[in-house]
């Protein structure tokens, strides 16, 4: 039987990591997969995480199983950051569980939605490619709408039209902040409207919060999620600690479920636990335990938040420098200055993206997405020159 399987292409984004590593050029630039880099081009372990890991090694007295929900103290410690420390629903109408990264959380959220009767998922495009891949794998239909307009603003008309055609068997999957791949986020006023439309159409919101703190701050980046949650009876929030705690390969995430009342939660969570058991049984512990130790210790928490501030400041600096370059060849870099998080899209053709790679050693996704954290004050001029050359 296995002989019948067809060859699948490697994941285009993850394949870039290997292509970049194999390139012998000393001045190559990696703007591919979304990992934060310092001004020296490094992705170090957060000092706060190192501190927590030290404690973990010293204090952890068992590695026995915890169950499909993982480390519930980790899940609880994160909640005030996601839902606000004064949220009346936290621990009442909202419950969570640990997942292997944001992808594990999305997989679980979408499988839970499907199990509850959802047929279709409304997704703004372009989106993170794994959104559509998970939907396809689960047999969920995808309804696409255009996320952003050519002028760099969100395409609210497209979202309004998509929601106008939606019903109770539909879910809408939205990026909570730092939209991947465009960096173009909804304003507060837009979130206010979106929350109302979702509530009116009784669509299930699935909110993907994978970059909290990398846009405008931990509180600011939670606006959309919190705004939608006050408007609707049910919601799913998919959380990733991969970026904001720098834990990428340790796979640290959480799924939060909000229900109309506290008494609905055990039934729904029992389904989420059963799905987790059938998928990965239990999430990996180490990274989640490190996050918990950071959040339980005020000194480590302050250190983590300061490290997050530094990351954000550096990305703002890179964005400001790109914006200051203005029109470069055929590309206007001005809008990159106001966009959020790790990503922006450089409007290049597939051929131009290839030329950036082959001629200039600059690695970026086929969509023209760049990871702005891959740019440093040492290589940004080369990047700008290369864009000018390939679009001349
Ligand atoms: C990205 O979009 O680069 C990140 O979310 C990493 C990934 O898993 O694709």
Image (cartoon, rainbow, N blue to C red):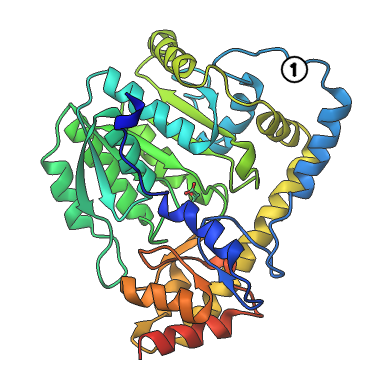
Q: Quadrant of residue 373?
A: bottom right
How far across and how far down the image is residue 137, in percent?
31, 32
Quarter occupied by the C terminus: bottom left
Q: Residue at left 47%, top 74%?
A: 357
Counting from the top left corner in percent of width and height, residue 209 is at: 47, 42
- Residue furthest toward the right? 58
Q: Is residue 392 above or below residue 148?
A: below
* Left or right: where 190 falls relative to 92: left
When the figure is inspected, residue 268 is found, relative to residue 75, above or below; the finding is: above
Is 27 left, or right, of 384 in this rendering? right
**Residue 386, position as x, y percentages in the image:** 48, 84
Query: In the figure, 195 relative to 307: above or below?
Result: above
Observer-nearest residue: 54 or 209?
54
Count the labels in the image: 1
Residue 133 percent across, percent down from the top left = 33, 40
Question: Tag 1, which secondary structure?
Answer: loop
Which residue: 51% across, 23% down? 96
């Amino acid at each position: 039987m296995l002989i019948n399987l067809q060859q699948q292409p490697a994941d285009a984004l993850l394949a870039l990591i290997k292509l970049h590593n194999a390139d012998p050029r000393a001045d190559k630039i990696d703007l591919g997969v979304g990992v934060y880099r310092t001004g020296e081009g490094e992705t170090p372990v957060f000092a706060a995480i190192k501190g927590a890991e030290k404690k973990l090694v010293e204090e952890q007295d068992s590695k026995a199983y915890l169950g499909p929900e993982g480390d519930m103290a980790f899940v609880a410690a994160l909640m005030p950051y996601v839902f606000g420390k004064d949220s009346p629903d936290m621990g009442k109408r909202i419950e969570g569980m640990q997942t292997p990264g944001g992808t594990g959380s999305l997989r679980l959220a979408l499988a839970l939605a499907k199990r509850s009767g959802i047929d279709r998922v409304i997704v703004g495009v372009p989106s993170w490619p794994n959104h559509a891949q998970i939907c396809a794998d689960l047999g969920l239909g995808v309804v696409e709408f255009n996320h952003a307009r050519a002028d760099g603003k969100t395409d609210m008309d497209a979202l309004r039209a998509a929601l106008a055609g939606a019903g109770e068997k539909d879910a809408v999957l939205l990026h909570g902040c730092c939209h991947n791949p465009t960096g173009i986020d909804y304003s507060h006023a837009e979130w206010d409207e979106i929350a109302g439309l979702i509530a009116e159409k009784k669509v299930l919101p699935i909110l993907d919060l994978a970059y909290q703190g990398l846009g405008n701050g931990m509180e600011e980046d939670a606006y959309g999620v919190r705004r939608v949650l006050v408007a609707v009876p049910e919601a799913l929030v998919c959380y990733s600690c991969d970026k904001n705690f720098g834990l990428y390969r340790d796979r640290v995430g959480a799924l939060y479920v909000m229900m109309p009342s506290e008494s609905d939660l055990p039934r729904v969570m029992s389904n989420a636990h059963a799905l987790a058991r059938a998928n990965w049984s239990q999430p990996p512990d180490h990274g989640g335990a490190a996050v918990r130790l950071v959040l339980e210790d005020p000194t480590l928490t302050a250190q983590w938040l300061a490290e997050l501030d530094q990351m954000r400041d550096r990305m703002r600096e890179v964005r400001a420098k790109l914006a200051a370059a203005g029109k470069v060849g055929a590309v206007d870099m001005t809008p990159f200055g106001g966009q959020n998080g790790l990503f922006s899209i450089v409007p290049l053709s597939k051929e131009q993206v290839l030329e950036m790679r082959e001629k200039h050693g600059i690695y970026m996704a086929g969509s023209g997405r760049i990871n702005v954290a891959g740019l440093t004050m040492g290589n940004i001029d080369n990047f700008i020159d290369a864009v000018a050359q390939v679009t001349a």
